[in-house]
Amino acid sequence: MSESNSATWLAHVYVTLKTVVNDPQGLAIADGLHTMGYGGVEDVRAGKYLQVRLRAASAEEAQRLAEEMSDRLLANTVIENYRCVIEPAS
């Protein structure tokens, strides 16, 4: 792909623990919210959010690259799920 045929994209990558994996950080946050009076909170799952700026020829190619990066480095797919959302970078 030549530089002139590509655009800059922003990949929003959301990584969360799989539901079968214990989430001590989420439990601690839920306990803190309960202590603060938010009794309606039933569950909290902690995760991470990453922004990746990348060059690709199309949104589909940017999506493929973001998912490939997530599979290889950004998420531990044994215990985590991820979701990638692509948009043109401003």
Image (cartoon, rainbow, N blue to C red):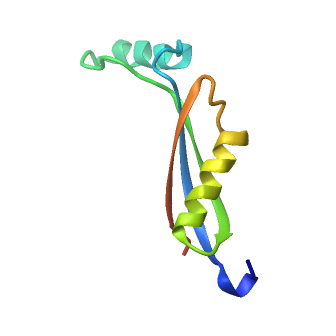
**Residue drawn at point x = 66 percent, y = 84 percent:** 5
Task: From the viewer's side, name the closer residue of 71 and 21.
Answer: 71
Position of 88 relative to 38 (above/below) = below
Position of 70 relative to 44 (above/below) = below
**Residue drawn at point x = 58 percent, y = 68 percent:** 9
Where on the picture, by quarter, is residue 2?
bottom right
| Residue 54: x %, y % from top left | 67, 65
Instruction: Please state, as top left, top right, bottom left or bottom right, where the N terminus lies in the image.
Output: bottom right
User: Can residue 51 be seen here?
Assistant: no
Residue at far left of view:
40
| Residue 50: x %, y % from top left | 60, 48
| Residue 79: x %, y % from top left | 60, 23
The number of numbered badges drawn on the structure is 0
User: Can residue 3 be seen here?
Assistant: yes
Task: From the viewer's side, name the closer residue of 88 and 4.
Answer: 4
Where on the picture, by quarter, is residue 57?
bottom right
Position of 34 relative to 13 (above/below) = above
| Residue 69: x %, y % from top left | 68, 48
Position of 40 relative to 70 (above/below) = above
**Residue drawn at point x = 74 percent, y = 82 percent:** 3
Task: From the viewer's side, name the closer residue of 52 and 44.
Answer: 52
- As drawn, is 6 to the left or to the right of 3? left
Residue at far bottom of view:
4
Instruction: Please state, as top left, top right, bottom left or bottom right, where the C terminus lies in the image.
Output: bottom right
